[in-house]
Amino acid sequence: MEGIREVTLDRIQLGWQQALSKTALLDARMNRIEDIVTGNFIYRIDGYIWGEHLPEKNISYPSDWWQAFKARWFPEWLLKRYPAKYTTQHITASIIYPGLNPSIPDRTWRLKMWINEYNEFWSSERN
């Protein structure tokens, strides 16, 4: 038949590998789950890492270049009539310590330690 040809398919091996340091995740476990809807395998690595949650911040900035122009150059009376619009983002962050593996019992979930003060953006309210 015209436009139809015979092809030979080879079984080609595929794989995926990800290097993960032993000190990156403590008590790491890998699970394989089969998604019955798609027939795909899902590999998940669970573990924990020591870290510190930083205070949450809200940052506001002009929504676009025109709003920034108004905020910077419009006189106060004109800003009252046509206020600049701002976008606010809620920021959360953590400091992580990937190499920290203290000799403490396995079921300890909180650790107190002394460190130098971190970035001023997170540690102070100065503008």
Image (tube, rainbow, N blue to C red):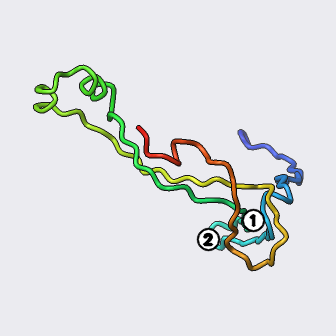
Residue located 66% across and 70% down the image: 35
10 Å neighbourhood of mark 2: few (<14), some, or many (≥20)? few
- Front residue of 7/27: it is 27
Name the residue tied to disc 1. 45
Disc 1 versus disc 2: nearer the observer: 1
124 lies left or right of 82:
right
46 lies left or right of 54:
right
Q: Are marks 1 and 2 in contact (CB under 8 Å)?
A: no
Q: Quadrant of residue 4?
A: top right
Quadrant, the C terminus: top left
Q: Amino acid at mark 1?
A: Ile
SS under mark 2? loop
SS under mark 1? strand
Residue 41 visible in the displayed image: no
Q: Amino acid at mark 2?
A: Val
Name the residue tied to disc 2. 37
Q: Position of residue 6 (x, y in %)?
A: 82, 46
Q: Quadrant of residue 50?
A: bottom right
Quadrant, the N terminus: top right
